[in-house]
């Protein structure tokens, strides 16, 4: 039983860190943009793209591995609908994360000058969609059978 609890925490902690890190970075970039200082915004975007997003991505990629191990240990079916839906949503989350990474790079390149409104809309849309998909995955994990 201790093995199960360890796996449960090994799955829960990265999930919480991904959500908290994502929300913290959205707030940090929003605050840097509101400050109006292009140098601060460029530095925050560079740090986010080079260090934070890859770290959050690795944490997110550990979730299917620890989740599979957890489901296998409990003996639940891997064909359960809640698990299949969450796997599809996870694939959508990965694609949105890659798209967001690219749009943040374009924003970083344009941060010194005028940022096109369409670019900022895409960044906000990708971030909002990622948050919705992440919360949907959490809801599916919470609704699973005990």
Image (cartoon, grey):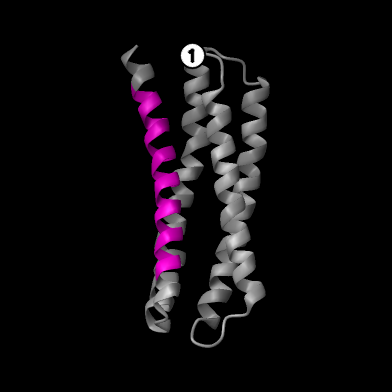
Q: Can residue 50 be seen?
A: no
* Left or right: 7 in relation to 144: left
Residue 81 lies, with reference to residue 125, above or below; the image says above
Label 1 Cα crowd, 10 Å radius (few <14 / some 14-19 / many 20+): few
Magenta-highlighted residues: 6-31
133 with respect to 5 (left or right): right
Residue 29 x %, y %: 44, 66
Which residue in the protein does label 1 denote? 74
- Name which quarter of the figure residue 82 lies in: top right
Q: Is residue 13 magenta?
A: yes
Q: Quadrant of residue 8?
A: top left
In this rendered view, identify the residue nearer to me: 45 or 78.
45
> Residue 53: horizontal and vertical position, in percent?
46, 58
For the point 40% across and 39% down, the residue is: 16
- The quadrant of the rendering that contains the N terminus is top left
Q: Position of residue 26 (x, y in %)?
A: 46, 59
């Amino acid at each position: 039983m201790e093995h199960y609890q360890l796996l449960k925490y090994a799955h829960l902690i990265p999930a919480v860190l991904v959500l908290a890190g994502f929300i913290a970075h959205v707030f940090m970039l929003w605050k840097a943009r509101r400050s109006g200082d292009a140098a601060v915004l460029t530095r925050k975007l560079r740090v986010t793209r080079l260090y934070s997003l890859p770290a959050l991505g690795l944490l997110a990629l550990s979730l299917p591995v620890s989740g599979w191990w957890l489901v296998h240990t409990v003996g639940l079916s891997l064909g359960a609908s809640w698990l299949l839906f969450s796997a599809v949503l996870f694939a959508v989350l990965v694609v949105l994360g890659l798209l967001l990474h690219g749009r943040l790079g374009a924003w970083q390149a344009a941060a010194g000058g005028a940022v096109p409104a369409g670019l900022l809309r895409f960044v906000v849309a990708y971030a909002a969609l990622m948050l919705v998909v992440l919360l949907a995955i959490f809801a599916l994990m919470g609704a699973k059978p005990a």
